[in-house]
Amino acid sequence: MTDDSAHSNESTDTTPSTGNVASGPDHDVSFREAFWIWVQVAAYSFGGPAGQIGVMHKLLVSQKRWISERRFLHAMNYTMLLPGPEAQQLATYIGWLLHKTKGGIVAGTLFILPGFVSILALSILYAEFREVTSVEAIFFGLQAAVLAIVVEALIRIGSRALANAAMVAIAAGAFIGIFVFDILFPIIILTAGLVGFFGHRYAPEVFTVITGHGSDEGDEDGVNARESEDESILDDRGEPIASDESETEAVISDELIADHERPSTWRAARVAAFWGALWFGPLLSLYLVLGAGHIFTQEGIFFSQVAVVTFGGAYAVLAYIAQEAVATYGWLEAGEMIDGLGMAETTPGPLVQVVQFVGFMGAYRNPGMLDPLVAGILGSIVVTWVTFVPCFLFIFLGAPYIEYLRGKESLTAALSGITAAVVGIILNLAVWFGLHVLFEDHWTYDGYGMDLLVPFFETLDVAALVIVAGSFALIFRFKQGMLRTLAIAMAAGLFYHLVLLA
């Protein structure tokens, strides 16, 4: 039912005018090899969307050359427009490009799995023990290292997307809009897309930064060309890759079109029916068996609603979830939401996985006839299911149409604007995260239409600053990988809490 292949007579009206058409994934990347790369991506997926997208870019674009720069950014643009965790959906998208639906399912599921297991374990510790010094120490060190990892990923992505002054201006405007004036994420993205779309009419060479398949400008105006002229692709240690390797054509190149990438109405209907049933079937079963007032039914319905409004990632929807979970449902106490976010920030996987903690605590405190721990675990499963099944639906339903639109210059110009805005959005996440890692207290300036978070500078956490500085040195000066940096930072956090503060 989920096979993506489409017969040519189903999609002749939507086939791009140029490009090489293959009957399927026409490459020699085995499913087994891809599986272990997705395991590696999952293991490295710390640091929120910026760090996670950076990991995928480093492994899939720079090292493996499995997907070209422009197709990677084109896929990223689409996932940024969707509700839900963009990094997890990007992994699903690229997995689908490589190995159809089964590739997307494996990539997306593996991306979620480490975070699910980690947050479930931490939720149990939190509910049963609450004060665990060693866990607090691990969080302390990891948070500091994650800040450096996010900044490195921001630099890596920004250096490729901000190809001219117009793109820099869009990124700066997006950052100011969301960080200073608290403008809604969808409004910023829509505005950036419109700027790129209409800007293309007047200055196509400026606004078509990410040229898609079939573009008239060709490589000379694309990100790849600028990259080859101005900077080398870097390997996982930040070293320039030899020129002969950087010129190797990507497996998923700009020109290749496989049959499963071609849209058709019949395929779309099958995908919508299958994944829609997986999403709403369990909800209907919970409602019929347990009733509308049961905690599992309430969580399933509420987080299904959250799944379609989480534009901008976990931070954008955090206030809404906290308000409903604390004030309306009483699942959490005030302040516990931040503890859950801390778990999501310092464990692998998407930040929106924080909803799992909310689901666990809500069911743990309202277990009914079940043991509280059993209820909490089941609540985690329910919430995770209704949060991430829609992500697979969005990708498998929309990806063929997004691939088809790669050849439309006005639309790729709109996506170029969106990419620049996304850099500003990620910068906002990095700054927000840095303020909370380095300072213990903050205040909000809300004059002249601004909603600006400002730290109390006297609350600077010197120990956190030292670990952050050390993490920056490990990454940028000594070219250490993420796992080694995280391990060293974790050890530093343990030493500080268990030795120096003992």
Image (spheres, grey):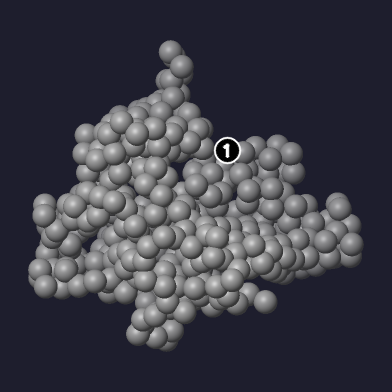
Q: Quadrant of the N terminus?
A: bottom right
Relative depth, front residue between 413 and 188: 413
Residue under pointer 1: 319
Residue 34 vs 387, above or below: the answer is below
Is residue 417 visible in the rendered image? The answer is: yes
Is residue 132 visible in the rendered image? The answer is: no
Q: Is residue 315 left or right of residue 362?
A: left
Residue at x 32%, y 74% (from the top left corner): 251
Relative depth, front residue between 267 and 495: 267
Q: Quadrant of residue 486?
A: bottom left
Residue at x 28%, y 71% (from the top left corner): 250
Residue at x 25%, y 38% (from the top left corner): 206
Residue 443 vs 495, above or below: the answer is above
Residue lying farthest to the top in this orientation: 448
User: Of the residues shown, which amino acid type is indicated by label 1?
Assistant: Ala
Q: Quadrant of the C terminus?
A: bottom left
Tell me residue 183's x, y (percent). 48, 29
Tell me residue 408's x, y (percent). 41, 50
Tell me residue 8's x, y (percent). 55, 73
Relative depth, front residue between 216 and 320: 216
Tell me residue 385's x, y (percent). 65, 64
Residue 307 vs 4, above or below: the answer is above
Total labels: the figure holds 1
Residue 488 vs 49, above or below: the answer is below
User: Under tag 1, what secondary structure?
Assistant: helix
Q: Quadrant of residue 326?
A: top right
Dot 1 alpha-carbon crowd within 10 angstroms: few under 14, some 14 to 19, many 20 or more:
few
Q: Is residue 230 left or right of residue 223?
A: left
Residue at x 49%, y 68% (from the top left corner): 261
